[in-house]
Structures are given as structure tokens and as C-alpha cells.
């Protein structure tokens, strides 16, 4: 955000919201881009064969015991 503010010539004293600055420069939020990349990767893994180790790990279910046993 510091670089985007510098590009626009806006300081923190101007009290412009980050969303306004990103919208002005047509820049996506970093968190949104990370989520997009993770979802894309998840889609690649889910399209693999059922025997694939990564797909087996992602679709595995944990065994939860309520009686305190391990």
C-alpha cells in the first residue's frame, strides 16, 4: 500500500481508504489474489486421478474420538 500511495501522491494524512486507492489504480487486494491462487491449485488437485497421493491427502478424513482415546 505504501507504493500505491506513493504512485498517487497520497499520504496517510490524507486519510484515503486502501480500497479507494486500489480501486483507483485497478489493483486487487493481496489477500484476494492469494485466495484465488489457492482455489486454482485446489481445482488442479481435485481433477487428478483418485490414486494420486495429494488428492488422497486432501480428501482424507480425520478420525475423531470423543472418549479421549488416541
Image: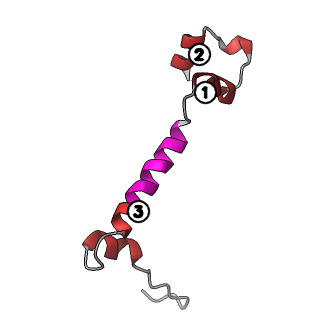
N-terminal-most mark, 2 or 3? 2
Mark 1 surroundings within 10 Å by alpha-carbon count, few (fewer than 14), some (14 through 19), many (20 or more): some
Place of residue 22 in the rendered image (x, y in percent of width and height, measured from the top left): 61, 27
Q: Is residue 15 magenta?
A: no
- Asked if the residue at tag 3 contacts the one at tag 2, i.e. Cβ–Cβ closer than 8 Å, the answer is no
Place of residue 66 in the rendered image (x, y in percent of width and height, measured from the top left): 55, 88
The N terminus sits in image quarter? top right
Magenta stretch, main secondary structure class: helix
Place of residue 10 in the rendered image (x, y in percent of width and height, measured from the top left): 64, 11
Mark 3 surroundings within 10 Å by alpha-carbon count, few (fewer than 14), some (14 through 19), many (20 or more): few
Place of residue 52 in the rendered image (x, y in percent of width and height, measured from the top left): 25, 74
Q: Which residue is mark 3?
A: 43
Task: Tell me the SS state at disc 3.
Answer: helix
- Asked if the residue at tag 3 contacts the one at tag 1, i.e. Cβ–Cβ closer than 8 Å, the answer is no
Q: Is residue 39 left or right of residue 55?
A: right
Magenta-highlighted residues: 30-42
In the rendering, which numbered label is found on residue 22? 1
Q: Which residue is mark 2?
A: 5
Amino acid at each position: 500500500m505504501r507504493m500505491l500511495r506513493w504512485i498517487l501522491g497520497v499520504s496517510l494524512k490524507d486519510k484515503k481508504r486502501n480500497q479507494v486507492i486500489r480501486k483507483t489504480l485497478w489493483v486487487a487486494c493481496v489477500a484476494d489474489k492469494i485466495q484465488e491462487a489457492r482455489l486454482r491449485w485446489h481445482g488442479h488437485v481435485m481433477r487428478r486421478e483418485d490414486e494420486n497421493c495429494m488428492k488422497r491427502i486432501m480428501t482424507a478424513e480425520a478420525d475423531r474420538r470423543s472418549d479421549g482415546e488416541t
